[in-house]
């Protein structure tokens, strides 16, 4: 079964989702990204993955944020969040607003960017992230803006649409597999700090020493949460004992 979550104008066949941005403002320059700002005051105390939602009983403590640092196919595609918002429907076996219930914050979906991805596709994924952020805010959710970049070529658009002083989230998991990845990650992080001047950064994944030095250099406030993989490995090392 599918049901409507955002009503389209009845006299317009809007397959592009322009109706999602009614009342929004757009960034200056050539990319026209929707302008969004995290509408939260406090930092989350815990993160829970979207992949865990809907799989049996899930305890959601106060102050918990839902994150989308998972494989794209788990939240994107024919029955994913983007098509759900565009079509104005909830999918029983895909995305539906029931999955957001109980969370105090929603970290905006992390539509992937890769170095070998066509630039047009990178821009599209950044645009979709901003649109989803704006749409969820219009539905009354407290959102945290996700920031993603590749190399310096992406700096032209990957920070567009994020208001200065926002609380932002960054997925650092998998971004330090080798020296090149680490250099690219820290370079983009530094550029983001200069551009957005975030009031706080939420990290999903390990914060390496070189990254900590960079954060200290700019006196940047931040909080880090271990990835689900790291948590699982930690439990295995300690015999998965209960606490």
Image (cartoon, rainbow, N blue to C red):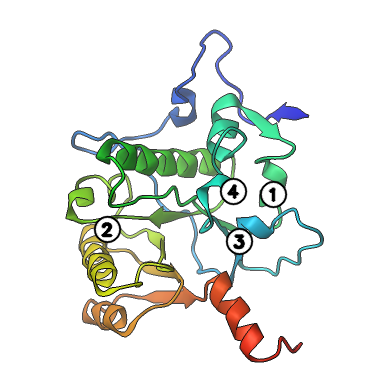
Q: How far apart are marks 4 and 1 (CA)?
A: 13 Å
First-in-chain label (2 vs 3): 3
- Residue picked out by circle 2: 196
Q: In this view, does 1 lie to the left or right of 166?
A: right
- Residue picked out by circle 4: 74
SS for dot 2: helix
Q: Where is residue 6 in the image (x, y as percent from the top left)?
A: 61, 29
- Residue picked out by circle 3: 49
Q: Which residue lies furthest to the bottom in this view?
A: 238
Q: Residue 171 carries which label?
A: none
Q: Distance between the residues labelled 3 and 4?
A: 11 Å
- Residue picked out by circle 1: 99
First-in-chain label (4 vs 1): 4
Callout in the foreground (2, 4): 4
Which residue is rendered at x = 30% and y = 73% of the image? 178
Is residue 140 placed above or below 7 in the rendered structure?
below
Q: Residues within 10 Å of mark 1 (few under 14, many from 20)?
A: some
Q: Where is residue 199 in the image (x, y as percent from the top left)?
A: 35, 66
Q: How far apart are marks 1 and 2 (CA)?
A: 30 Å
Q: Is residue 207 left or right of residue 215?
A: right
Which residue is rendered at x = 45% and y = 27% of the image? 22
Q: How far apart are marks 2 and 4 (CA)?
A: 29 Å
């Amino acid at each position: 079964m599918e049901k409507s979550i955002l009503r389209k104008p009845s006299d317009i066949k809007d397959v592009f989702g322009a109706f999602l941005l009614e009342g929004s403002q757009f960034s200056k320059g050539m990319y026209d990204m929707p302008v969004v700002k995290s509408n939260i005051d406090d930092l989350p105390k815990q993160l829970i993955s979207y992949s865990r939602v809907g799989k049996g009983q899930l305890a959601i403590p106060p102050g918990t944020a839902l994150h989308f640092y998972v494989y794209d196919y788990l939240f994107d595609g024919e029955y994913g969040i983007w098509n759900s918002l565009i079509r104005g429907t909830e999918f029983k076996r895909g995305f539906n607003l029931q999955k957001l219930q109980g969370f105090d914050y929603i970290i905006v979906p992390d539509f992937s960017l890769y170095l070998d991805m066509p630039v047009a596709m990178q821009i599209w994924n950044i645009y979709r992230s901003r649109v989803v952020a704006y749409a969820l805010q219009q539905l009354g959710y407290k959102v945290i803006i996700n920031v993603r970049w590749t190399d310096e070529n992406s700096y032209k658009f990957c920070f567009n649409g994020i208001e200065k002083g926002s609380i932002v989230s960054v997925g650092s998991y998998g971004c330090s597999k080798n020296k090149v990845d680490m250099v690219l990650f820290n370079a983009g992080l530094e550029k983001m700090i200069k551009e957005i001047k975030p009031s706080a950064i939420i990290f999903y994944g390990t914060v390496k020493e070189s990254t900590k030095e960079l954060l200290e250099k700019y006196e940047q406030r931040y909080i880090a949460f271990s990835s689900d993989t790291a948590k699982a490995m930690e439990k295995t090392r300690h015999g998965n004992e209960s606490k």
